[in-house]
Amino acid sequence: MMNEESVFFSRVLTELTLSFHIIYATIGVGVPLMIMIAQWVGIKKNDEHYILLARRWARGFVITVAVGVVTGTAIGMQLSLLWPNFMELAGNIIALPLFMETFAFFFEAIFLGIYLYTWDRFENQKKHLLLLIPVAVGASFSAVFITIVNAFMNAPQGFDVLNGELVNISPLLAMFNPAMPTKVAHVVVTAYMTSAFVLAAIAAFRLLKGSNHIYHKKALFLTMKVGLVFSIATAIIGDFSGKYLAEYQPEKLAAAEWHFETEESAPLILYGILDDGEVKYAIEIPFALSILAHFNPTAEVIGLDQFPTDETPPLYIHYLFDIMVTIGMSMVLLSGLYWLGTKLKWAFVNSKWYRWLIVLGGPASIIAIETGWWLAEVGRQPWILRGIMRVEDAATTSPHVDIMLILFAGLYLVLGIGSIVVLTRMFRKNPVEQEIEDRHIEKGGDIL
Amino acid sequence: MTLEIIGIFVLWTFLFGYLVVASIDFGAGFFNAYSLLTGKQRILTNIIQRYLSPVWEVTNVFLVFFFVGIIGFFPKTAFYYGTTLLVPASIALILLAIRGSYYAFETYGSRGHKGYSFMYGLAGLFIPAALSIVLTISEGGFVHMINESPTLDYEALFTSPLTWSIVVLSLSSVLYISSVFLTWYANKAGDLDATRLMRKYALIWALPTIITAGGIMVELRSHNREHYENMLDIWWAFALSLLLFIGTVWLLWSKRSYGLAFVLLGGQFLIAFFSYGFAHLPYLLYPHLTIYDSFTNEAMATALIVAFIAGLALLIPSLYLLLRLFLFNKDYVRGKKEDNHA
């Protein structure tokens, strides 16, 4: 192929954009729900702290949304700019959810504008909370529709190819493809989970850095509790994802689990390294892969031997799988212990080292999201549309992709640094103690 | 009406929406930066911030809607435009990204950083320039098929007077649309100084707008005869647009009914934009691509139109709420209502 260079740089640019966007997108999907929960708890308990929590989260949220919006626009357009052949094909079959996503996002954007500018405008706090519902719904549905497109790339259906022509196209059948239920559920739930743990990390960090205010303790307990619920949900859905893969994309599962030979009663390989095609230092759990794949300890699991080598994904995705699962499981444990420990008044959950672990949980959850997406995308190689179109046939023929890569890398650097600087400055300038005091003076003034 | 026509009509309508909303936004950013430079900041910043803050995110969606929609209705455009537009569209994207996020950083993060305002103002002028290149390319003559893949001839593009006229038109109409709108908005807010200043800008930018628009017609005569003749066939529509333009300028000149002036301006651009687009049909890209040979299948088209109608049913009431709470809310516009920003 003459086009190798464009293909390579298109891949790198897409990976870069997605890896950067997904951080902000995940926060963008999850945080509105957290704000909603906090505000709702605040109204129900008539507790100013939770209301303030919602308000401060909302303030930070705008910054992340801004970056999410612009990088989302970038990836939306890059799909056509870098993968024109793929989009020409995909546009015929899977354009519907892409189109619907813009509506979901439009809906979210309008109500976010209203919500942000109507604090204290309503007598009844509940009315203000109502404005947040479309924001949270819009955000989650954006994720649902976009993930449907990704699911379609993994399990394309809803059309036939007859003499090189697309026929019998059914947009709904394409949307409700076999990959869709597990994929959508996994993406949405992990977004909630990650957002909860990121916010928990911030609260724990404040508690470690001197402020012993009850506000941070309430924030920490709330977010850890929510995080626990969603990390358990993530584990359950992850299990179903394994069963989906075994049925519809066995090569992806086999590559991720280093399952080379088709066999019954297959063991699960955890960790380890690959040395000259030989697995070393791994933990082997008997029957576990058969259970993960088919709910049955003796079931047969298809191995890589069933696929031609030019149709198997790179084997390094096993490491990505390990990182993702390890972090996910650790977060269940960490938040579970914290919840239990708080209920049973165990001292260690309030100790310094435990809080540092919670702080670590924030970035770790983001890493789990990143490795999860790399696993999903690299695990589909060499296909862009599984079984239909290869990545190298989809890319642009334009020779300028390398320069664009440099420009976009610079952009993401500027946006990344900018958003971190603005966020830290925003909260450092206005610490929560100060704001609580200010609000009391304001309220006091009203009474006088 | 065929499905193809419905599809392009819907998309063109959204592009028109983007043209108006984004022009106001880009122009406002520029005037804001310019007023900082000339020390007139006190007069303008308040009015501009008040309008922009709650709506900035909505602007972007119009554009996303257009380019996602065009892939949906006309998937072949991905192949032709996707391949050729890599550079101009990427540059526009980067500018849009910096502008959008730094607007949020400044407004919600740290108010009053001058560097942000200048970047923001300048980026707002480069974006329409970069995006308007698409219209130039669509006139044909700049894209050649080499090895079965469309390739953009940059030299021809950047040496063509048509390119530069369209760039100038995009800039002057951004400033013109924006200043007419802000004249009305400032007047509504009862801010006399700002009204006076914006009215002056509006009158200044009216002339270059109409001159370049006329000049482009002349250049098309030699560049794309077919399009030119199609436009001549509906000369009355362009004449009507011109009358509306004269109406706007007259109202501004005699300092009355700024609201009506903005409505007439909207009419002027609406008629001109749709007449231009209508005359362009059936071509999406002369001479390679028409709306008929690039159209999606019937099942997808129907699904998209159904989704579109359902989406509108959701969006129109929400947009109405947004406008009622902010744009048309007297207390908010006048700054009487407290800024209840989170």
Image (cartoon, coloured by chain):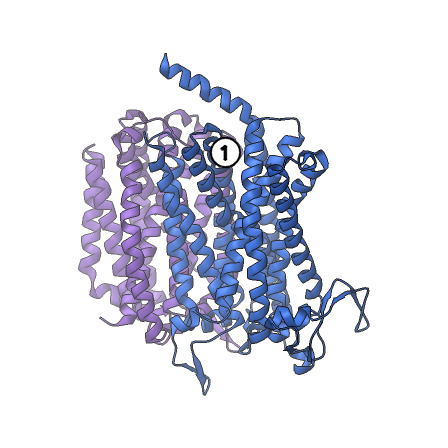
Q: Residue at x 33, y 68 (%)?
A: B303
Left or right side of A209 for A131:
left
**Letter of the chain that mark 1 sits on in the rendering:** A
The foreground one among A394 and A178 is A178
Q: Which residue is mark 1?
A: A53
Q: Residue at x 24, y 45 (%)?
A: B265
Q: Residue furthest bottom?
A: A163
- Residue B183 lies, with reference to residue A109, above or below; the image says above
The foreground one among B240 and A363 is A363
Left or right side of B60 for A314:
right
Question: Where, quadrant-wise, is the C terminus of chain A in this rendering?
Answer: top left
Q: Position of residue A354 (x, y in %)?
A: 69, 39
Amino acid under label 1?
Leu
Q: Quadrant of residue A266?
A: bottom right
Q: Residue furthest top?
A: A448
Mark 1 residue element: helix
Q: Residue at x 59, y 38 (%)?
A: A343
- Residue A130 lies, with reference to residue B281, above or below; the image says above
The foreground one among A123 and B99 is A123
Q: Position of residue A26 (x, y in %)?
A: 53, 51
Q: Which chain is blue?
A: A
Question: Where, quadrant-wise, is the N terminus of chain A in this rendering?
Answer: bottom right
Q: Position of residue A19 (x, y in %)?
A: 60, 55
Res B84 visible: no
Left or right side of A231 for B104:
left
Q: Residue furthest front?
A: A344
- Residue B52 lies, with reference to residue A363, above or below; the image says above
Q: Position of residue A216 (x, y in %)?
A: 57, 31
Q: Residue at x 59, y 67 (%)?
A: A242
Res B176 visible: yes
Q: Which chain is purple?
A: B
